[in-house]
Image: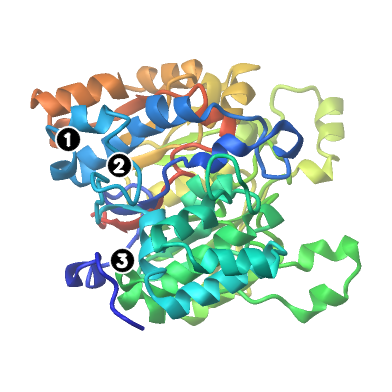
Amino acid sequence: MTSLPAMANKQSEAPVRVTSEIGTLRKLLVHSPDSGLGKVVPSKAQDWLFEDIVHLDTIRRKEYDYYTKILLYFLDPDRIKGKLAEADDPGRGFYKPGRPTFFKSDKVVELQWLLAEILENREIRMQLIASVCAIESCSFQIQTRLQDLKPEQLAKVFITGSVDEKEMLFPPIPNFIFTRDIGIVIGEYLLLNKPAKKARTREALLSKYIFFHHPFFERLRPNVLELSETFQHFLLPKDGEERKVTLEGGDIMVVTPDHVLVGVSERTSMEAAYQVTNLLFSRNVVSKVSIIRIPKKRDYMHIDTVFTQVKRNVWVMLGNFSKKAITNEDSDPVQRILEGQKKDDQLRIIQFRKDNVENPTYFNNLEDLLVDISRSDLHSTEETVFLYSGNNEFPFDVREQWTDSCNLLALKEGVVLGYDRNDKTVEAFRKNGFHTIHAEELIEQLDSGRLTTAEIHDTLILMPSAELSRARGGFHCMSMPLVREDIR
């Protein structure tokens, strides 16, 4: 493979290591909202996994741009400090790969930039054009036309499906902003996804080419883990879909160096959970895997829409999966027995240990598992605290879970990003001693020097969310951590 221009040797030597959900974040993959989001039409929204259409300019300049700025201030302050005017000038292209003024951070890493760089290599470019055209059933004329595009243009077309604002060659991949789902770093290994929905097939293909061909991931390649489809699946009737191998990163959580959580959900199959468990054990990646089976509902989608970690002893979660809710403590005996017969709505948690797979541990509810992680795995001596979506008040609990109140990204232990619209969940944070601050105010304080990131503790950073939340993904979804500091 020929050398690629922009990523320096220091980046090919960059460590890739994630051993927790809350260690200080040092490097991650993101993708800024592109014009493909503005091409989603109502009739195709659900096919492309969106509940609604979003307003592109608002989502870019009034919401996601705050996310990029916050990430840069915490991970790569030299790229943003003193440059707010430049970043906020729409004509400068601060957020657009391919523009001379693009922020181009090797810590807040933009996927489109990486894709454009591997397309500098003619052999890779031709292979990827052929693969994309096969997936999208393109004509030979379109394939030939793509070969004439420059790498930056071609990368944009692969993601947005458009040559310009008027002409579309194939559908966009608007879910590319949810970088968590394309893969997950576990320790010093990378587990690649197998998307459940056809709309995400091109995402998986582009991501695989980036991981296998960009020098940024050169040292990681021997540690890339992939799942294979089973031949039995192809022979089974449609009601045998459970044997299909589907996996998305929102169903994987690395809670300690030795313990990984795997969700079985609408998007991740039991067959995938089985393969992941055996693969992680056989490669000695971890010694403990907990399988969390949640109802296959669009409301939940992945386990990270149901709960995420804030501190070693603090979790935010949907109260529907609490001990009290699972046991129906508030119901009378007849109701409790009848409710318990709804087999399709049961939560099931099984924990396997590498040295004793034949004797797994079972948990009846999510709270017991998370308490065990805080106490036994993370050695927390403090009481485990649960902050509930919507402050556990109906109907705010389910309303705010729908807008990702449980889908938070930890920048460091106790400092998390969440949406400003989830008022009752914010109230729960405040009642439990957390500070809250709006992103715009925080950025102004960081830029002026009145506050440093080191001074920020036990804080929920409130991000603008009118349009982003309609895409049904929070900041946990919109991040793929590559490096976190180990927690003590």
Residue appearing at x 73%, y 46% in the figure: 296
Amino acid type at image mark 1: Thr
Q: Is residue 486 above or below residue 389?
A: below
Q: Mark 2, residues whose alpha carbon is within 10 Å: few (<14), some, or many (≥20)?
A: many
Helix, strand or loop at mark 3: loop
Q: Position of residue 202 (x, y in %)?
A: 60, 60
Q: Which residue is mark 2?
A: 411
Q: Residue at x 10, y 24 (%)?
A: 448
Kindly indicate whether the residue at mark 2 contacts the one at mark 3 (C-beta within 8 angstroms): no
Residue beneath disc 1: 453
| Mark before the other along the chain sequence, 3 or 2 | 3
Q: Which mark, by number, is residue 39?
A: none
The disc, 1 or 2, on the residue closer to the chain's N-terminal end is 2
Residue 223 image-quadrant placement? bottom left
**CB-based contact (under 8 Å), mark 3 and mark 1:** no
Q: Residue at x 21, y 32 (%)?
A: 86
Q: Quadrant of the image for the N terminus?
A: bottom left
